[in-house]
Amino acid sequence: MLVNGKVQQDKSAWKYSKTESGYRYSGPNGSVVITGYPWRIEIFNADGKLITKTINNIDGSETFTPLLPFSFVRRASDYSTSMDAVFSLSPDEKIFGCGESFTEFDKRGQKVVLWADDANGTQNETMYKPIPFFLSSRGYGLFMHTSSPITCDFGKYYSGIYSLMIGDDEADIFIFLGEPKDVLNEYTNITGKAPMPPLWSFGFWMSRITYFSEAEGREVTKKLRENKIPSDVYLPPGQWIDYQTAKVYSGGWHNIEAGKIPIVVLVHEGAVIPHIALAQSTAQMDWSKLDLIVYATDSKKVKGLICLPSDNLLHKISLVKKGDQFIMEIDPLAGKVSWKMTLFQINAVI
């Protein structure tokens, strides 16, 4: 879940000092104070204000409600082990994040189970896009670096704390201090930043749980056009070759008719796609003979991918144009396959 599997450290960003009962690490966005006994971690913002702290047994003395402190837990029923990371919640604190769910935006007062499960609707708390990260209105974010199930109780059991029951015997937790944009920037620095989506992805999104017939789908598209809602195909920059009709389309908006098979399948110019001869069943396919179909209008070099069931590895294919033909630069399968190169015949340029 981390970029290159590790976090780059900037030790100069933190200043260390010894306190009477522990240690202090100070930085431009706040400080962390660790107390040896009773063990506690306190997080302060840049103004020196306490924003959260770990909970220990002493904190439970102020209430009759039994509280589980920040601790290592062993379940009596099956002796499984896990970590329960417990932090304080301020009275006015709000919690946002944890992925896509259909409950209230502010997770304060909720129990959120971070485990992928199809919600089968929007009337329950089950989520199918859990993310082990959340933002607090107190000026920090928290990332739980684990792929195990996590039960997050954001003040539902007891309003003054939140509990992160991690289904692992280790608690690898990152806390980020600062403004939301700064927290998100640092969080994505260690987990990876998403590239800018293509322009077409920002368009209108029409979706539902399921369609029970082709007629239902066509009725939706009919209504879109009747109400003048844009719903035609937008292509990213470049040239796109229709797999069925062999027509070539440039980037931009298009109204493309489906081919003999009632779907639109487009291949980006400069691609090569492996084809295999038809067989009675997949078990009878002859993977020793493959036809490489080259989709090129102007490209002198085309690329593709191939994966054989014998090794289940993804190999890169690169062909270059020599005269009127394309030849393979380097055989990625070292003679295991007999290749045939075929140039896809273009029908018309639109």
Image: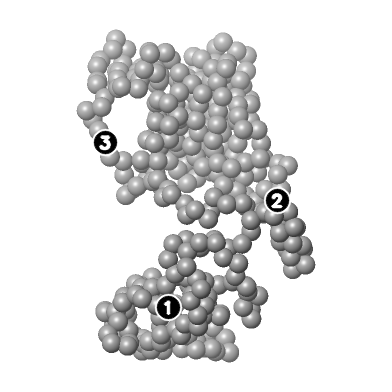
**For the residues marked 3 and 2, what is the alpha-carbon distance in whole angstroms?**
42 Å
Q: Residue at x 51, y 20 (%)?
A: 88
Residue 9's disc number: 3
Which callout, 1 or 3, points at the residue further toward the start of the chain? 3
Please rate how many residues cluster around mark 1, counting C-alpha atoms within 10 Å: few if below 14, some from 14 to 19, many from 20. Answer: many
Q: Residue at x 29, y 10 (%)?
A: 20
Residue 120's disc number: 2
Which callout, 2 or 1, points at the residue further toward the start of the chain? 2
Q: Secondary structure at mark 2?
A: loop
- Most extreme residue toward the left is 12
- Residue 65 figure quarter: top right
Q: Secondary structure at mark 1?
A: strand
- Is residue 176 positioned above or below 34 on the image? below
Instruction: Name the mark nearer the viewer: 2 or 1.
Output: 1
For the residue pair 322 and 212, the one nearer the viewer reads as 322
- Is residue 333 positioned above or below 30 on the image? below
- Residue 93 figure quarter: top right
Q: Is residue 13 left or right of residue 218?
A: left
Q: Residue at x 38, y 70 (%)?
A: 314
